[in-house]
Amino acid sequence: MKRRIFAQAAAATLSATFLIAVEAQNTGATPQKHHKIVIQVSDADPAKWNLALNNAKNLQDDVGAANVDVEIVAYGPGIGMLKLESATGSRIADTMKANVKVIACENTMRGQKLSKDDMLPAISYVPAGVTEIMKKQGEGWAYLRP
Amino acid sequence: MKRRIFAQAAAATLSATFLIAVEAQNTGATPQKHHKIVIQVSDADPAKWNLALNNAKNLQDDVGAANVDVEIVAYGPGIGMLKLESATGSRIADTMKANVKVIACENTMRGQKLSKDDMLPAISYVPAGVTEIMKKQGEGWAYLRP
Amino acid sequence: MKRRIFAQAAAATLSATFLIAVEAQNTGATPQKHHKIVIQVSDADPAKWNLALNNAKNLQDDVGAANVDVEIVAYGPGIGMLKLESATGSRIADTMKANVKVIACENTMRGQKLSKDDMLPAISYVPAGVTEIMKKQGEGWAYLRP
């Protein structure tokens, strides 16, 4: 009886050990990697806004839209990109149709007395753009600051 | 006697295995995450200096100052932020009181013939700002370039 | 006979367990870390190009050229850094001699109707600069945007 318990314990341990070994290997390079990237827009410069939108599109074109999550976060002087009168309004609509998430910083909006009525339709919001950018990196997202 | 040894070996192995399993799980998302972020200042532009200081404050306000380590590294054209005559001198003192570490690059100081007497009191120093920024990322810190 | 099998199983499990424990420890901070950093150039500004080249050199000087892989990726408005007539042409040749990899974005080149004949000799190319920057971060490289 005791011997059977030892055998079961040893077997359970071995299988648990192998599972962990396999898990450990999976944390390395995987063959078909899914990418994630957060793009920061913090300049009051429409050329930078267009560059950020180009970057999002090029990433999707290059690795395949299904293989990369792209998120654009506008904050500080960059918030103008997401205002109703933004010079890049129609491009942003196209970008969102292509499954890029476009996010405005509510902290910045409060500072500039902007309400959601002042912003482009269908965009997303976070309480603080910088926190969003920090958290995404903590979750393994790459960071791009055009 | 031998049986007891087997039992002990199996028990030791099982407990070691479980410890590793728990450790492995801890490398994933943890419930109360402590954040770390290094903020780069490399522009000779007081608007950028203020933005960096705003970003540090907003991060602390948003996730709680106790839950985030913030470090500001000024180098290259950004070193002016930390000079005695900096337009943001008093704000930097407040920022350091709020436990944000503020660091000047000694490489840049040497290049611009600046000594510590030319710099704001109580700031920190590193031999090379870019190395500090690189190392922090290697240790899991997020990166922000306002 | 059975007892010997148990003993072998337990021994194998223990040694596997210890191997995993050692592996797990190795994923933490290692004593002599080899650093990797990708530097982005996306501004049409020779001062930024010089800053990027200074940063690459300072990193090598500070941690030892053998201890850090440095890659400079120029894309978008930054592509001018790598054109034949670049104001930083001779410095870029020196930088490549010092084993820094210098890479141009072919996406940008296509957009600006540039061929490899228009570019500095001996530089490297990638289909999309932003993808390169994203992938490197996914492989553990630090990111610097001067």
Image (tube, coloured by chain):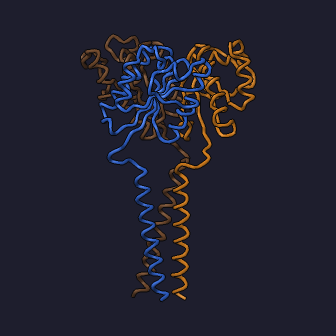
Chain colours: A brown, B blue, C orange
Q: Nearer the viewer, residue C116 or B108?
A: B108
Q: Is residue B97 left or right of residue B24?
A: left
Rendered view: A12 above or below B58: below
Q: Nearer the viewer, residue A53 or C16?
A: C16
Where residue A1 sits in the image (x, y, percent)?
39, 88
Rendered view: B78 above or below A21: above
Where residue B99 sits in the image (x, y, percent)?
37, 33
Residue under the image location 58 percent in, 30 percent down? B128
| Quadrant where the image shows the C terminus of chain B | top left
The single residue placed furthest to the front in the displayed view is: B117
Rendered view: C5 above or below B36: below
Where residue C77 sits in the image (x, y, percent)?
57, 16
When asked about the image quadrant of residue C116, the answer is top right
Where residue A44 sits in the image (x, y, percent)?
41, 13
* Residue A96 seen in this snapshot: no
* Residue C26 seen in this snapshot: yes
Residue under the image location 40 percent in, 36 percent down? B69
Residue under the image location 33 percent in, 10 percent down? A85
Q: Is residue B82 left or right of residue A82?
A: right
* Total residue callouts: 0
Q: Nearer the viewer, residue B55 or C106?
A: B55
